[in-house]
Amino acid sequence: MTEYAIVGVKMVDFEDKQGKPIKGASLYIVSKDKSVIGMKAQKIWLNEDICDMLDFDLTKSINQKLHVFFNEYGKVADIQLIA
């Protein structure tokens, strides 16, 4: 299982052009990857439901290590900090 480190968090709360509320977080993470010299950097989207179910504060989790679980559609299903 890939181990990631959180390097940035951007909390999002706005309405799209149709007036639909968009709430969640952009999570900036890095991981080791054999095909990359250095670290592989990614941005993943956490919708409001995922953010609400977390048992830790994203904004206080910079440099924390974690596992990210994706559903069959490639969307984030769960995140767990590594103790």
Image (cartoon, rainbow, N blue to C red):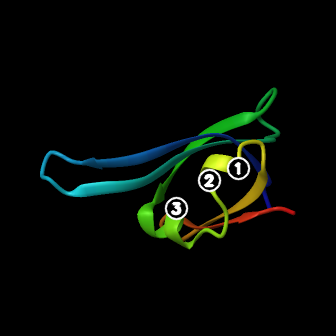
Most distant residue in the top direction: 37
The numbered mark, 3 or 2, whose residue comes first in the sequence reads: 2
Identify the amino acid type marked 1. Answer: Ser
Do labels 1 and 2 touch, CB within 8 Å? yes
Crowd band around label 1 with a 10 angstrom C-alpha radius: few (<14), some (14–19), many (20+) = some
Identify the amino acid type marked 2. Answer: Leu
x, y (%) of residue 42? 61, 40
Identify the amino acid type marked 3. Answer: Gly
Crowd band around label 3 with a 10 angstrom C-alpha radius: few (<14), some (14–19), many (20+) = few
The numbered mark, 3 or 1, whose residue comes first in the sequence reads: 1
Q: Which residue is mark 2?
A: 58
Please tell me the numbered disc located at residue 74.
3
x, y (%) of residue 55? 65, 70
Taking depth in this image into account, of 23 and 57 the one nearest to the observer is: 57
Do labels 3 and 1 touch, CB within 8 Å? no
How far apart in space, not on screen, are marks 1 and 2 (Cα)?
Answer: 5 Å
How far apart in space, not on screen, are marks 3 and 1 (Cα)?
Answer: 23 Å
Do labels 3 and 2 touch, CB within 8 Å? no
Judged by depth in the image, the label closer to the viewer, 3 or 1, is 1
Q: Is residue 1 above or below residue 45?
A: below
Q: Report the side of 24 relative to 79 (left or right).
A: left
Q: Report the side of 11 relative to 39 (left or right).
A: left
